[in-house]
Amino acid sequence: MATFRLARRLRAERAVDSMSDGQFAVLAALKVYGPHTLGELAERERVTAPSMNRTVNCLQESGFITRTPMDDDRRKVLVDLTPAGRDVVEETVRRRDAWLEAALGELTDAERTALADASAILRKLADR
Amino acid sequence: MATFRLARRLRAERAVDSMSDGQFAVLAALKVYGPHTLGELAERERVTAPSMNRTVNCLQESGFITRTPMDDDRRKVLVDLTPAGRDVVEETVRRRDAWLEAALGELTDAERTALADASAILRKLADR
DNA sequence: TATTGTTATACTCTATAACTATA
DNA sequence: TATAGTTATAGAGTATAACAATA
């Protein structure tokens, strides 16, 4: 229950209020893992290609990503962040960090240490 | 990131695959906090009354909740779990517990202790 | 006249099926 | 003939506006 509620609270902190979680997840994946084809993005986010196509259309119209046909295989399209898209990811991370920093600031040293110990273990659980 | 991923993984464990998160959240709230009017449910889940009305319609058609006009104010409708609805909540909790138990079983005693220490602190953070 | 619930309608996000362009 | 992407269309879930019943 604690993880559900904390995840929900953190998700609420974002740079662009009108952007959906699915749209932001694409920007974040591009920032962390670099450019992807549309199919790769669909597989990573576990949605269908048409669904990802629509998400990417919205992000392109908003100026957050570019689409570039690939030279070695002209059927493929490479999706990458624009500077504006990168800004959205970085600003959202900043906001979440700021929220977390303020929240962690109200804890004792022992409590912060307990969370640090737990984070790697939680990650291991989630990867099962 | 660990909380996002763990929350997502746990949410996937449910008794009725076709039930949406929103529908399940209503059943869980009724189980934990007892019967609610439609307006109370909408406020608790932070959706509009028409949206909650639709969710409740689906749950009623599936036989998971009952609607009862209230005696003291006939405008109000009390929503409560049926035995089948209660079963869905309990079975989902059992599945999540089973998944967690298996996952925790692969950890060391020290790791389990670290998670136990962290859970109360995470809850405190989420309540901010 | 205000409040509670409901219906009407529209928008977003998701999906499957059909289509286009390229390999 | 198969694959990557796109378009067409439909099904959930959400919203706002309008309505009905009750206080």
Image (cartoon, coloured by chain):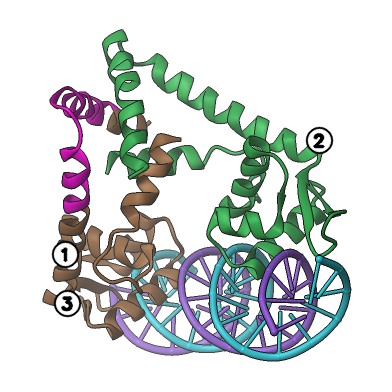
Chain colours: A brown, B green, C purple, D cyan
Between the C-alphas of marks 2 and 3, the distance is 60 Å
Q: Give the amino acid type for the residue marked by disc 3 in the picture.
A: Asp
Locate the N terminus of chain B by quadrant.
top left
Magenta range: A97-121
- Asked whether the residues under the numbered discs 2 and 3 touch, taking CB atoms below 8 Å apart as contact, a structural biologist would say no
Mark 1 residue element: helix
B103 in magenta? no
Where C2 sits versus A13, above or below? below
Q: Chain of mark 3?
A: A
Q: Position of residue C12 (x, y in %)?
A: 46, 76
| A126 left or right, relative to B24 | left
Locate the C terminus of chain B by quadrant.
top left
- Asked whether the residues under the numbered discs 3 and 1 touch, taking CB atoms below 8 Å apart as contact, a structural biologist would say no
Residue A64: mark: none
- Residue D13 or A75: which is nearer the viewer? D13
| Earlier-in-chain disc, 3 versus 1 | 3
Q: Position of residue A120 (x, y in %)?
A: 22, 29
For the point 30% across and 20% down, the residue is B117
Residue located beneath label 2 in the image: B83
| A106 left or right, relative to C9 | left
- Outermost residue, top side: B109
Residue B106 occupies quadrant: top left
Between the C-alphas of marks 1 and 2, the distance is 47 Å
| D3 left or right, relative to A68 | right
For the residue carrying disc 3, how many other residues have a C-alpha within 10 Å: few (<14), some (14-19), or many (20+)? few
Q: Position of residue A32 (x, y in %)?
A: 17, 55
For the residue carrying disc 1, how many other residues have a C-alpha within 10 Å: few (<14), some (14-19), or many (20+)? some
Residue A71: mark: 3
Q: Give the amino acid type for the residue marked by disc 2 in the picture.
A: Pro
- Residue B55 or A64: which is nearer the viewer? B55
Residue A91: mark: 1
